[in-house]
Image (cartoon, rainbow, N blue to C red):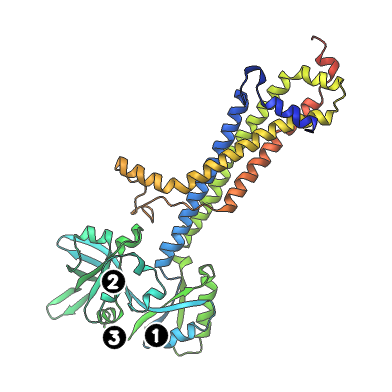
């Protein structure tokens, strides 16, 4: 079978013939270092992709993509909604009102942001119905003053389905007997668990008509409407376009979007992924430098062989290709090994961390610190290709100097003391 001379000799040098090993020790360490670098990069980038996905699907699925509000309560939100839906980027709309305050039960106190919703319209713009642990959105009845809270808030208040909690508004009512805080007894009709500490601990849901009564508005009045967009990254421009389309009406509207409330967190995740990827690339670079060390040692060890090949007619280019083949083979095997192990690890890291948490009884991610309480992972093909491509490129570049040095070997000098 025909095999080019550089490939044949280069593959022979990869094998440690004198010691009858498939790979020499020094080549093996280079392969292992490269494989570990590729493995770590794929796993870490997959975890960062998982955080990015959970941010979009959970947190940004719960909060509004954009909101339209007026400086005065909106009397008929459906008219505004119909106007907003004329924008092709708007997928759905729903009314909302927000109330800040505290929930108390016995001596327990929990700050809360009450989102007043229309139970039949809310599933169009939010994924909250997918995370209901007890009860359902339609249990919020107008005039019933029911409330749906997260699991963390329920645990802190020590309440369950059907219990009463007291809502305290951040304002006082003036009476002939003096000033008293505004309070209202609410019934827990549902408990949700999103897995995000910020949401499970400080967000509650009530009916829009109940919120209007707490605000001393008309039952049909709301604070604004929520917009769900086909592309959430276009939220600033789309919300501004919708506001301009409403400019001819008597009411003055203004818009808010998710980039103002959670944009910094999302940008931080993207920046961390980029910076961590560049830092981890240094691991691959160090492994590539190991290839340089390997080839330099091989060139030194094979000086007499190189001289003999030159005297037999091998050209400097062929000598260079021999050691490029050896280094490239180490890089290809190390990269492929790291790629396979990295893909397997990225697909199973979430389950492994969950198992480790059950075995040790220790939670690595606290939902009160991070926005989720488990380690997510999402493997993306472009990340795998990028990591493997960078590894192969660095491995190839690492072969150039030792190969060039081998090609400059002078036969007479090398064989002088042989």
**Disc 2 secondary structure class:** loop
Q: Is residue 387 left or right of residue 124?
A: right
Residues under numbered marks 2 and 3 in contact, where contact means CB atoms less than 8 Å apart: no
For the residue pair 361 and 186, the one nearer the viewer reads as 361
- Kindly give the residue lying farthest to the front in the view shown: 1
- Looking at the rendered structure, the secondary structure element under dot 1 is helix
Task: Please state the horizontal and vertical placement of residue 225, each as a whole percent of the image.
Answer: 41, 79
Rendered residue at 30%/73% (across/down):
137
Query: First in sequence: mark 2 or mark 3?
Result: 2
Please tell me which of labels 1 and 2 falls first in the chain. Answer: 1
**Residue 106: x, y in percent?**
14, 62
Marked residue nearer the N-terminal end (3 or 1): 1
Residue toward you, 105 or 101: 105
Q: Nearer the viewer, mark 2 or mark 3?
A: 2
Figure disc tally: 3
Cα–Cα gap, marks 3 and 1: 12 Å
Q: Quadrant of residue 33?
A: top right
Check disc 3 and report the residue beneath it: 219
Quadrant placement of the N terminus:
top right
In the image, 87 versus 237, the foreground residue is: 87
Looking at the image, the residue that sits furthest to the left is 177
Circle on res. 77: 1
CA distance for labels 2 and 3:
22 Å
Residue 402, visible in the rendered structure: no
Question: Which residue appears at 27% of the width and 60% of the height?
Answer: 151
Judging by the rendered image, the residue that carries numbered circle 2 is: 136
């Amino acid at each position: 079978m025909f095999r080019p001379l550089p490939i044949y000799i280069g593959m022979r040098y990869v094998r440690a013939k004198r010691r009858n090993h498939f790979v020499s020790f020094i080549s093996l360490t280079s392969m292992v270092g490269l494989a570990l670098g590729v493995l770590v990069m794929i796993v870490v980038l997959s975890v960062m992709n998982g955080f990015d996905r959970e941010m979009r699907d959970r947190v940004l699925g719960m909060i509004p993509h954009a909101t339209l509000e007026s400086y005065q309560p909106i009397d008929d939100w459906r008219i505004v909604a119909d106007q907003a839906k004329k924008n092709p980027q708007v997928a759905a709309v729903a009314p909302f009102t927000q109330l800040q305050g505290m929930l108390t039960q016995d001596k327990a106190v929990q700050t809360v942001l009450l989102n007043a919703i229309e139970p039949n319209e809310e599933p169009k713009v939010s994924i909250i119905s997918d995370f209901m642990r007890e009860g359902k959105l339609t249990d919020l009845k107008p005039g019933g003053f029911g409330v749906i809270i997260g699991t963390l808030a329920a645990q802190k208040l020590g309440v369950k389905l059907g219990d009463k909690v007291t809502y305290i508004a951040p304002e006082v009512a003036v009476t002939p007997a003096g000033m008293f805080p505004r309070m209202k007894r609410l019934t827990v009709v549902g408990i949700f668990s999103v897995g995000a500490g910020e949401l499970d601990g400080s967000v509650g849901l009530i009916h829009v008509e109940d919120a209007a009564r707490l605000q001393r508005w008309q039952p049909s009045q709301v604070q604004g409407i929520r917009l769900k967009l086909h592309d959430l990254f276009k939220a600033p421009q789309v919300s501004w376009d919708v506001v301009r389309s409403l400019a001819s009406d008597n009411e003055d509207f203004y818009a808010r979007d998710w980039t103002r409330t959670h944009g910094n967190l999302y940008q931080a995740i993207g920046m961390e992924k980029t910076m961590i990827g560049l830092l981890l690339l240094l691991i691959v670079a160090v492994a590539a430098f190991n290839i340089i060390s390997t080839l330099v040692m091989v060139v030194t060890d094979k000086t007499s062989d190189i001289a003999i090949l030159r005297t037999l007619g091998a050209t400097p280019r062929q000598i260079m290709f021999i050691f490029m083949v050896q280094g490239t083979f180490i890089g290809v095997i190390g990269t492929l090994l790291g790629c396979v192990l990295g893909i397997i690890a990225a697909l199973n890291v979430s389950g492994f961390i969950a198992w480790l948490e059950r075995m040790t009884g220790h939670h690595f991610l606290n939902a009160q610190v991070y926005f989720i309480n488990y380690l997510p992972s999402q493997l993306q093909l472009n990340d795998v290709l990028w990591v493997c491509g960078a590894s192969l490129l660095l491995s190839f570049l690492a072969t150039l100097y030792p190969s060039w040095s081998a090609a400059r070997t002078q036969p007479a000098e090398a064989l002088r003391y042989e």
